[in-house]
Amino acid sequence: MSRKRKELPVLEHVEITDVAAEGNALARVNDMVVFVPYCAPGDIVDVKLVKKKKNYAEGRVIALQKPGAIRVAPRCSHFTLCGGCRWQHLPYEYQLDCKQKQVKDAMERIAKIKIPEISPILGSENIWEYRNKMEYTFSNKKWLTYEQLASDEEFSDRDGAGFHIPGAFDKVLDIECCFLQDDFGNRLRLFIKEFGKEHGYSFYDLRQQQGLLRTLMIRIASTGEIMALMVFGEDDADRIETLMSAVRSRFPEITSLLYVINTKVNDTIGDQQVVRYDGREWIEEEMEGLRFRVGPKSFYQTNSRQAYTLYKVARDFADIKSGELVYDLYTGTGTIANFVASRAAKVIGIEYVSEAIDDARVNSLANGIDNTLFFAGDMKDVLTDEFIELHGRPDVMIVDPPRAGMHEDVVNVILNAAPERIVYVSCNPATQARDLALLDVKYRVEAIQPVDMFPHTAHVENVVKLTLRR
C-alpha cells in the first residue's frame, strides 16, 4: 500500500518581496524561499503550498489579503488560469526593469565574464495585440478550475478550445477572449468551436489521441494578410470539407486557408503534408520595403513591429563593411540574411527547417537580392570546418539559435572560423550567457542590448556584439 502524501500547509499573510524566474514571484518565510505565480511585490497573500523541499517551496495564492502598491488590474478574465500573460498585473515599466535585471543576472551569474554596461531595454510599442501568430488546442475535456471542481455543478459539455495548462499536456483552458492578437483570432477560434459543437464534430481527446478537431494556428502579418491552418486528428473528408467551406465563406479576408491531417501522437506538423484549401500557401511580412514570405512551417519573430527593432540592432552591431562575407546561423526564412544583404558581399544562411530555407530563397529572389546562399540541415552537421573551407571564412557571424542555445560543436566551429565580429541574438539570456563563456577564449563582449518582444511575460530577447581579441 502506498504511503499517503502529507498535506502541505497554508501560509497566511505572506508578503511578496520580489519577482523570480519563469514569471513567478517570491517571498521569504522564516529561512524558506516560497515561489508563487501571479503576485506582485508588496502583495500580502495566503498561500497554499503545493510542493516543499528543504530550502524552498512552491505554492498558489488562495487569497489576496492586500494588494501591493505597484499592482495593476489585469485586463484578461483568464488571468491566473492561463499560463501566458503572467505579468499583466505588473506595470509595463516595471516589467521592463525586471527583464533588464534578468539579463544582468544571467551575465553575472552564468557567463561570469567581463561585460560592458548593458544598454537600457527597448520596450514594445504595442503591449496588446502584438502577436502575429497564435496556436490553439481543441479538447473534449476542457480544464475545470479548483472552484468548479469543488462545486456541485454538473459539467456535461467539456468541449473547448484554448491553451494548455502549464505543466499538463492533457489539460486545456477554454479561452473566450485573448488580447495578444488582433480580435480576428478570437472570432475565428470561437466560430470553429461553435460550428464543431453545432454539427457534432468530435473534439480531440489528448489522452486517447483521437478526435477530429485538433489544433488551429492563426498568423496575422503586419501587411494585413492572414493565414489560418486547421489541424484535424482524423481523416474525415466530408466533415473537413464542410468546415473549411464554412470558414472560407464566413471569413473571406483569410488570404491563406490551409489544413493538415495529423494522426500521429504529437502536435508538430513539420513532417506533415499541408493542404492548401484556398488562397496562397504563404503570407508576406514587410520590413524596410522588403517582402518576406512566411509559410505554415516557417519561423518568424512573433512580434512583427518589434522584430524590426531587433533586426536593426543586430544590423548595427554587425557593422558590415563593403566586401565582407556574412554567415547567418539559424536563419529561419532568411529575414536577417536578406535584411543585411545590401551591406555585404555575400550572406550565407543555414537553417534546420528545409521549408523555411525554400522561403528564404524565394524571399531573396522576390526582393531582387542575388548575393545570398542558403543551406538546410542540422547546424552542427552543416556548419563544419570543411563547410567553411569550401565557402569562405566569414568576416561576420550572426547567430539566432533556439532557446537551448548553440550546440558545443557549433561553438567550436565558430571559434575555429574566428570571424572578426559575432552578433548573438537570443531569446534565452541564460543559455546565451553559457555560450558567451565558451566564446570568451577568443572574443570579448562589446555591447549588450535587451529588446522586449513579449510584453506581460518574463521572456526577453537579448542582442550581444562580440569582437575577436587581438
Image (cartoon, helix red, strand yellow):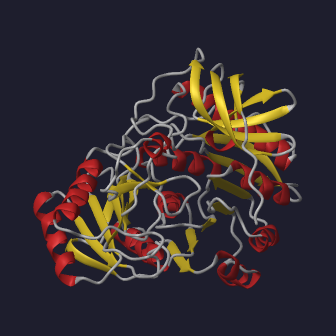
Q: Residue at x 60, y 41 (%)?
A: 458
Instruction: Specify whether 385 is left or right of 294.
Output: right
Residue 459 position, x and y percent, is 59, 45
Residue in front for this viewpoint, 416 or 90: 90
Residue 214 lies in quadrant: bottom left
**Residue 119 in view, yes or no:** no
Name of the residue lying farthest toward the front: 1
Instruction: Specify whether 321 is left or right of 246.
Output: right
Residue 22 position, x and y percent, is 65, 44
Name of the residue lying farthest toward the left: 249
Count of numbered marks: 0
Q: Residue at x 77, y 67 (%)?
A: 411
Quadrant of the drawing holding the N terminus: bottom right
Residue in front for this viewpoint, 121 or 247: 247
Quadrant of the drawing holding the C terminus: bottom right
Residue 463 position, x and y percent, is 65, 48
Residue 414 position, x and y percent, is 76, 68
